[in-house]
Amino acid sequence: MMGPAWRAVTYSLIHSLKESAMSVETNRSSPVLSGNSEEVGSPKQASRRAWLAGVAAAAGASACSGRVSLAQAGTGDEEVVAPRKPNPIAVSTYSYWRYRDDSKLSIEECVDLAADAGFDAVEVLHVQMTDESNGTLQRIKQRAFRRGLSLCGMSTHQSFVSPDPAERQKNIDHTIHCIELAYAMGIPTIRVNTGRWGTSGSFDELMANKGIEPTLEGHTDEEGFGWVREGFEKCLPVAEKCGVVMGLENHWGLGRTANGVLRVIGEVDSPWLRATLDTGNFLENQYDQYRQLAPEAVFVQAKTYFGGGTWYTLDIDYGRVAEILREVDYRGYISLEFEGSEAHESAIPKSLAMLREAFR
């Protein structure tokens, strides 16, 4: 409430404004004595100045009294701060597919399922798209809009870790293409990777070795980091032109650790290359690495494993993850990547409830 002093000030201002208003009305009815209806120094002009001054003073007093009232509504001194808005929760279309031969759904079907489940947004897995024509892109965008969802991210694949310049250029071109797809769909960020050496016999073997693989014979990780830096630098002009941020994920290869991701981001040194933090891809010291990467995160992918993970299961304390992200004031999307063996019809609603609770 307004204190006694402010009540007195406000009363005085209101009284002055009334007097000014009466003066204006009196002058309005007075005869004009010359061809100039508002001579310099005339009573009418003076009263108008008084009126304007009073209005300005009243506006200032009102604003000040509003601030004082907010402060007095608390413990007496501090200003009231609006409650923090919860992070919006998205779902990756990957969650409905998980690379299973018998369960690949279209992006449009995933959008409908996400809307029905109560998500705020959808992250599109690029390799799940079957048609990249502009008509299809716009239909997906319209479908999401009409269902009340944002298209918040696109998850893409590339690898710049190759001694072959032609292979690296192929991946640069692919990344630029994905940036342009995201732009056409109104998507503000894409997930990108450093890539890896490819010396594992299969992805299952890579997972069995916790994402660690030997370098290609005759080459070093130092060379690899140089290729990665060069690759992203060549993508920057298009990313900036389109307004699409590349979010480098902790996703095996040279980006397996927070240190690896941060090295690339630091060397490229551009606001158009930041981090996508995946909670499921740090297999050791996970919370320390979340904390390392959090300040650079523009997007967060949150793994859940109901029914047991495909390759492994991590016990992730999402309350703790949320606290780490709050410490750096991360207010962006949390995108569910369900990677368990349970049916998505039951696992995804449970995952959403868990994330809502943690990131409220």
Image (cartoon, rainbow, N blue to C red):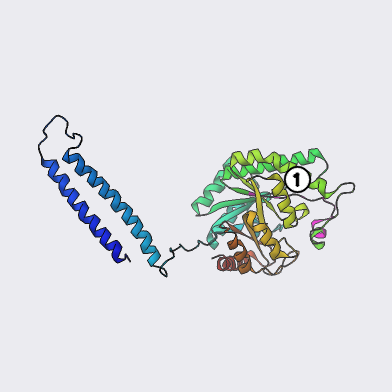
Q: Residue type at mark 1? A: Val
Bin the neighbour count of mark 1 within 10 Å (Cα to Cα): few under 14, some 14-19, many 20 and up: many
Residue at 49 percent across and 51 percent down: it is: 146
Q: Which residues are magenta?
A: 190-205
Determine the residue located farthest toward the right in the rendered image. Answer: 218
Q: Quadrant of residue 73?
A: bottom left
Q: Residue at x 73, y 65 (%)?
A: 285
Tell me, yes or no, if residue 171 can be seen here. no
Main structural element of the magenta stretch: helix, strand or loop? loop
Residue 333 placement, left or right of 50:
right
Image-quadrant location for residue 25: top left
- Left or right of residue 205: residue 104: left
Q: Name the quarter where the N terminus is drawn.
A: bottom left
Residue 8 position in % (x across, y down) = 26, 62
Q: Circle 1 — which element?
A: helix
Nearer to me, 239 or 59: 59
Taking the magenta stretch, the answer to whether it contains residue 305 is no
Looking at the picture, tell me which residue is in the foreground, 80 or 194. 80
- In the image, what residue occupies the spot 61% across and 41% down? 240
Horizontal side of residue 83 vs 113, given as left or right: left
32 lies above or below 153: above
User: Residue 12: image x %, image y %?
Assistant: 23, 57
Q: Position of residue 194 (x, y in %)?
A: 74, 49
16 vs 306, nearest the viewer = 16
Q: Which residue is mark 1?
A: 228
Quarter-wise, where is residue 177 in the image? top right
* Magenta span contains residue 203: yes
The residue located at (57%, 41%) in the rendering is 135
Asked whether residue 168 appears in the rendered view, the answer is yes
Rendered location of residue 122, percent (x, y): 58, 55
Residue furthest toward the top?
A: 35
